[in-house]
Amino acid sequence: MPTVTLNGAEIAYDDIAPPAPERTILLLHGFASNRNEGWKRTGWYQGLGRRGFRVIAMDQRGHGESGKFHDPADYGREVLAADALALLDHLGVRAPEVFGYSMGTRTAMQMALDAPERVNNLMLGGVGGKLFDPPRANEHGESIVTAMNAEDPAAIRTEFLRSFRQFADEQGEDRRALAAFSQAASPPLDPAALGRLDMPVLVVAGAGDDLAGDPEALARVFPHGRGVTLPGCDHFSAIPHAALKAAVFDFLDGMLDDDFPPFE
């Protein structure tokens, strides 16, 4: 397992390349996940490798085998994006394809905002029009922080929060680190700033993904955005699904250009 210290955090990553890689892709996992669960176990390493990609996947700080912190000040979207860009510098990669899922989309978008010349194509999975919705009060007064801090996950009344907690427990994640991660201050993403990004952008989410909303609604924010909805998938089932791989591979191959023209 290679690791490197970046911005004061030990970052674990994989860097897997075929003999003569044609392109490079950076993979950014979701909340409470890690590079092994989010990408390796679900077949992305193998699928991308067969297509000639050099695959770089990192455990974002607070997750997996990377450094854990219990202070919210050690997290935040700009910090995560800086880690990712520093890892690319460390590996000598200038402008890869960047694919984030769920929480990883926020890191990916911040990378594109901070250093647009470092992102070739941008792929955002498990996210959609709800990205810009204001936070809603939970009917049970629960949050991801209370879910991570709960002694007994059975006491969590909100189903999707209980799912995240159970997932974190299954992965052996540090719940205190995840709670601190969730309390980090990050300014809202600015649709106008995203609208100035010039790279092609794919936004893809499952039809049953109530956390994401309509991917086309978010794709319209970008000058060169494509929105794809995956039938039969929700937030958790989409990432290993063949339909998500097909959408991403088609996008990278340029096959979506004719079927999904840029939004005006």
Image: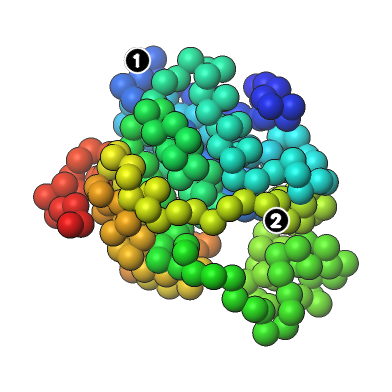
The residue under label 1 is 20
- Crowding around mark 2 (Cα neighbors within 10 Å: few <14, some 14 to 19, many 20+) is some
Real-space Cα separation, disc 2 to disc 1, in angstroms: 40 Å
Indicate how the structure is coloured in the image.
rainbow
The residue under label 2 is 182
Query: Does 198 sit above or below residue 130?
Result: above
User: Is residue 232 at least partly visible in the picture?
Assistant: no
Residue 73 sits in which quadrant?
A: top right
Instruction: Name which residue type carries label 2.
Output: Ser
Local secondary structure at mark 2: helix
The residue positioned farthest toward the front in the image shown: 192
The image shows residue 38 at horizontal and vertical percentages of: 55, 47
The image shows residue 2 at horizontal and vertical percentages of: 65, 22
Image quadrant containing the N terminus: top right
Q: Nearer the viewer, residue 110 or 66?
A: 110
Q: Is residue 24 left or right of residue 261?
A: right
**Residue 101 bears which disc, if any?**
none
Image quadrant containing the C terminus: bottom left
Query: Does 180 sit above or below residue 213?
Result: above
Instruction: Name which residue type carries label 1.
Output: Ala
Local secondary structure at mark 1: loop
For marks 2 and 1, give the one nearer the viewer.
Answer: 2
| Residue drawn at the location 36% of the way across and 60% of the way down | 218
Q: In this view, does 71 lie to the left or right of 44?
A: right
Q: Which of marks 2 and 1 is nearer the N terminus?
A: 1
Residue 221 sits in which quadrant?
A: bottom left
| Residue drawn at the location 48% of the way across and 73% of the way down | 210
Q: In this view, does 34 lie to the left or right of 226?
A: right
